[in-house]
Image (cartoon, rainbow, N blue to C red):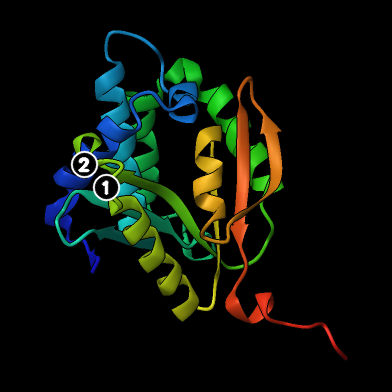
Amino acid sequence: MMRKASYRDKTRVADILTRAFDANESVNYVIPRDSRRKQRIRALMNYSFDVCFAFGDVFLSHDGNACALVMYPDKKKTTLRSVFLDARLVCSGTGIRNIKKVLRRESLIKKTQPREPMYYLWFIGVEPGRQHRGAGSRLLRELIDHSEEMRRAMFLETSTRRNLPWYEQFGLKVYAELDLGYTLYFLRRQKASAATNTGRG
């Protein structure tokens, strides 16, 4: 069973995601490919943990080898801490020179996403040495159950085309694509009530 992470789990979650997303196109789009790239990716994961801890949920698998960051965008608020986190990400993660590109990407993503309360799966990752053993599938099933309990449709994006069949077997379907020099796929899993609605009326 997955469990909600505490703030003490931040280092472990950042470790998993930094290693799991090292070669990810979407991550490397916003992170400068300089001598500090590894540290920058870790700064991005630390930032993502903090945002989800404040405005969403962070989960760890029972064995601590898989994790997920979930956001509820409708609950996100601008606070002194959120402004501080954004500024720190620019300094230690994306870099000042990358701001324009990052803001353009985020604007395009927001325009593509529907405006409704969502269960936004920002990151899901498995320790690289533990991948392909079912840990990711078990965690995703539990996340889907949690999204159903919250009566929210699950949304996510991926730049990894080979992962699409994996997501599709859990009921997630591509609803849009975005060309950013690489293809970003937008996926959605309907709420159970919507999926079973016959549309009679």
Residue shown at 28%/60% (left/top)? 59
- Number of the front mark, 1 or 2: 1
Is residue 54 visible in the rendered image? The answer is no
Percent position of residue 65, x then y: 19, 48
Q: Nearer the viewer, residue 36 or 155?
A: 155
**Count of picture labels:** 2
Is residue 78 visible in the rendered image? The answer is yes
- Asked which secondary structure carries label 1, the reply is loop
Q: Quadrant of residue 71?
A: bottom left
- Asked which secondary structure carries label 2, the reply is helix
Query: What amino acid is labelled 2 in the image?
Result: Arg
Q: Quadrant of the N terminus?
A: bottom left
Which disc number belongs to residue 130? Answer: 2
**125, above or below 152, in the image:** above
Q: Is residue 67 left or right of residue 199?
A: left
Residue shown at 39%/39% (left/top)? 86
Q: Quadrant of the C terminus?
A: bottom right
**168, above or below 99, in the image:** below
Percent position of residue 54, x then y: 33, 60
| Residue at which label 1 appears | 133
